[in-house]
Amino acid sequence: MSIPAFSDISKSANDLLNKDFYHLSAGTLEVKSNTPNNVAFKVTGKSSHDKATAGAIEGKYADKPNGEYTRPRPSPLRQPSNENPRKPLDKSRSRSRSKPTEFQFSLARLKGPRVFGAKVQGSASFSPQHTQLLMFWSRTGLTLTQSWNTSSALETKIELADNLAKGLKLEGVFSLLPSTQARGAKFNLHFKQPNFHARAFFDLLKGPTASIDAIVGHEGFLAGASAGYDVQKAQITGYSAAVGFQAPTYTAAVTATDNLSVFAASYYHKVNSQVEAGSKATWNSKSGNTVGLEVATKYRLDPVSFVKAKINDRGVAAVAYNVLLREGVTFGVGASFDTQKLDQATHKVGTSFVFES
């Protein structure tokens, strides 16, 4: 299994406990669309239980490798003349003439304009019957994402993967809030290898500050740490640590965050193809000896629908139902109940629609 990022060491349990519970918003609408030239659009809208609405539109372009295949019209074969019976047809000679001659070529660098170290690779074969050429223009993983939300916040994200080194991804995130002229500029690094995953986040305008985390793994065992640093103050702003174990059907992790003051232990188990279960316990050493506990489960009814349920130590329970109505249309509904205050209006209900094309 691949090594997760430091923040994803408990991802399986956190997704089971937090994702697909639709009671958090009164209504959610999401529309996804993909174009033939690798541009993906996503529009989201949410209505809270306080009747406040929020929305965002996002466009994402991924520069993926593409290919071209050209095959000219087959040339007519020249049939040998068999009018003279004294000259029989030499079939072996005919076969040798029709055998294609193949070669491969590779051009690592191109003269003239280049697109982030692009290269051409391909193969060609020639014969009297046909001529064909298969050419691939291989590009690096350039991704451009732009978003705009109802708070008039503009954000542009540029990603470049596997260009300088295999497993290295560079990110630049630039934001602007026109109403207050607030600006943001961040530079991120991700480096992933089979047994190592490290990240570095730099906020260039605030501080500047830096946050670095790394995690190593061996035969399922994981160990990692993170730290934040303020360049202007020349001091460490925070640090965390985590250990875990992952297997194909279960994962377990213990994390210590907020300067090793908040401890959390999580466990996830995929019982079979239909049932998943998980739990998480949290203890804040600064607030007292109370331990928060949360348990969740997921049951797949059929290939297109599932139900989820969870409950915490405070007696708040939540249920959710998700179903694929038709190709590209997903509906979800959820509710939460305070089992200790069933006679009070503390319960919440929410719905979600997702359209994909």
Image (cartoon, rainbow, N blue to C red):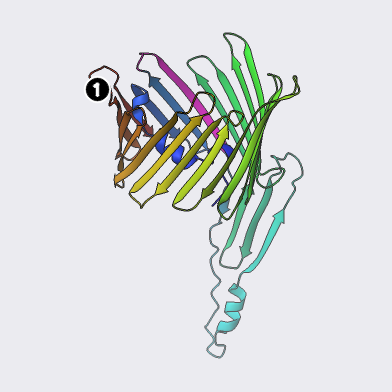
Where is 2 relative to 351, above or below?
below
Magenta residues, start to end: 49-62
Q: Quadrant of residue 176?
A: top right
Q: Residues within 10 Å of mark 1 (few under 14, many from 20)?
A: few
Q: Residue furthest bottom?
A: 86
Residue 243 position within the rendered picture, expressed as x and y whole percent measured from the top left: 57, 43
Q: Amino acid at mark 1?
A: Leu
Q: Is residue 349 left or right of residue 179?
A: left
**Rendering coords of residue 9 (x, y %):** 54, 41
Q: Where in the figure is residue 356, as x and y percent of width and height? A: 39, 35
Q: Is residue 245 visible?
A: yes
The one nearer the camera, 311 or 232, is 311
The residue identified by callout 1 is 342
- Whether 152 is drawn above or below 58: the answer is above
The residue lying at 47 percent from left, 53 percent from top is: 248
Residue 87 coordinates in the image, percent (x, y)? 57, 88
Q: Determine whether, in the image, residue 25 is placed left or right of residue 70.
A: left
